[in-house]
Amino acid sequence: MKHDFLYSVEREYPVAIERLWQAWTTASELEQWYHPTELTVVPGTATSVPDEGGLWTVAIDVPAFEFVAYFFGWYKHVTPLERLEHTMSYTQSKDEWLALDENAPHHKVVLEFESRGDNSWVKFSQFGEMPAEQIEATTVGMQSYFQSLADFLEEN
């Protein structure tokens, strides 16, 4: 599978780098914010083992279209407080999600982190294959995830 650059989203948050890293790598925290602002994570579906070879999973309820978006992948590179790289597979089939097929079609995600004084910055870049007309909507979707993260960090 080709892993061409598709898009990136970045944002600075008014928290320490350790706090931002924790939000991205702790399953219980991902479960609270890793979704677009208008959706929610299915309780009990977030997994995160942020070590090389470790698994991550999440399922997002999409009631308006009567399906669940299931995501899973494996961490490929972990440099604490600096960089995460992982695969990302997507399915609407719970059975496929539960099977956790490492050979399933996937994209590559690179997360870069940086401390900026009292703030911290993160950049999410996605690589893979996607129709050009879908890239803009996907970018807007990830911007919504970043807003969910901002809301979560403000409250926690």
Image (cartoon, rainbow, N blue to C red):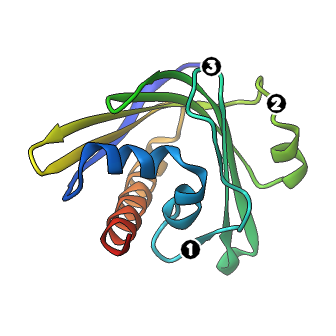
Answer with mark 1 or mark 3, whichever residue precedes in sequence.
3
Nearer to us of marks 1 and 3 is: 1
Element assignment for label 2: loop
Left or right for 12, reference 106: left
- For the residues labelled 1 and 3, the Cα–Cα distance comes to 30 Å
Q: Position of residue 86 (x, y in %)?
A: 54, 29
Q: Vertically, is 83 above or below 142?
A: above
Can residue 138 be seen from the camera position used here? yes
Query: In this orientation, which residue lies closer to the viewer: 5 or 113?
Result: 113
Q: Which residue is mark 3?
A: 1
Q: Residues within 10 Å of mark 1 (few under 14, many from 20)?
A: some
Q: Which mark is residue 101?
A: 2
Element assignment for label 3: loop
> Identity of the amino acid at label 1?
Leu
Answer with mark 1 or mark 2, whichever residue precedes in sequence.
1
> Identity of the amino acid at label 2?
Asp
Q: Vertically, is 24 above or below 29?
A: above
Q: Vertically, is 37 above or below 2?
A: below
User: Residue at the location (27% across, 43% down)?
Assistant: 17
Q: Position of residue 38 (x, y in %)?
A: 50, 77
Left or right for 41, reference 154: right
> Identity of the amino acid at label 3?
Met
Tell me the quarter of the picture where residue 46 sits. Answer: bottom right
Can residue 133 be seen from the camera position used here? no
Q: Which residue is mark 1?
A: 39
Q: Residues within 10 Å of mark 3 (few under 14, many from 20)?
A: few
Q: Which mark is residue 79?
A: none
Q: Position of residue 111 (x, y in %)?
A: 39, 35
Q: Position of residue 89 (x, y in %)?
A: 67, 38
